[in-house]
Image (cartoon, rainbow, N blue to C red):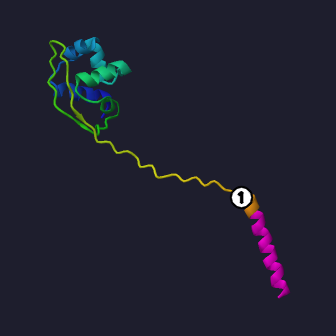
Amino acid sequence: MSIGERIADLRKEQNISQGQLAVALDVSRQAVSKWENDLACPDTLKLIQLAEVLNTEVEYLATGRKPVYEEAPIVLNMVKKVDKVVEVEKIVEKPVIKRIIRVKYRRNPMEYFAVGILGFLLGIALGFLL
């Protein structure tokens, strides 16, 4: 489903005509028609305003993915601007960061390596003698 199809479906669900949507967004009716026919795409600012008017999320308009949370229904009045109060319940899964342990050596690790090589050679030498 393209962005134009999503705009058209949401507009029809809200029972808003292209002209009413154009007035609400302060654009021409032809611009809305071009968006719905995928001949043009709304710019970022208009996309944000479009999401508010159509009572949806910008992410859904742009990508088609449904939002993670649900919104309470809002009554949209096209005659005058109405202050809206939106109750939003977000369900967010935060990644779990495991505890990071940093080991600070008291001595240089190369010293331990050198002692290990020396012990290995000493073991080989004792093996030949016995």
Is residue 38 visible from the viewing direction of this image? yes
Q: Mark 1 points at which residue?
A: 109
Callout 1, which amino acid? Answer: Pro
Q: Position of residue 34 (x, y in %)?
A: 31, 19
Q: Is residue 11 above or below residue 20?
A: below
> Is residue 38 on the magenta stretch?
no
Quarter of the rendering occupied by the C terminus: bottom right
| Residue that extends furthest to the bottom in the rendered view of this protein | 130
Q: Where is residue 56 in the image (x, y as percent from the top left)?
A: 25, 29
Taken as a whole, is the magenta stretch helix, strand or loop? helix
Q: Where is residue 119 in the image (x, y as percent from the top left)?
A: 77, 72
Look at 80% across and 79% down and name the residue there: 124
Look at 16% across and 30% down and name the residue there: 73
Look at 23% across and 12% down and name the residue there: 23
Q: Where is residue 121 in the image (x, y as percent from the top left)?
A: 81, 74
Q: Is residue 74 above or below residue 69?
A: above
Comparing 58 with 64, the one in front is 58
Q: In this view, does 122 lie above or below 108?
A: below
Q: What stretch is highlighted in magenta?
A: 113-130
> Is residue 119 on the magenta stretch?
yes
Numbered disc 1: secondary structure: helix
Look at 28% across and 11% down and name the residue there: 26
Is residue 43 visible from the viewing direction of this image? no
Quadrant of the image occupied by residue 51: top left
Quarter of the rendering occupied by the N terminus: top left
Comparing 3 with 79, the one in front is 79
Quadrant of the image occupied by residue 63: top left
| Residue that extends furthest to the front in the rendered view of this protein | 106
Q: How crowded is mark 1: few (under 14 residues within 10 Å), some or many (20 or more)?
A: few
Comparing 24 with 126, the one in front is 126
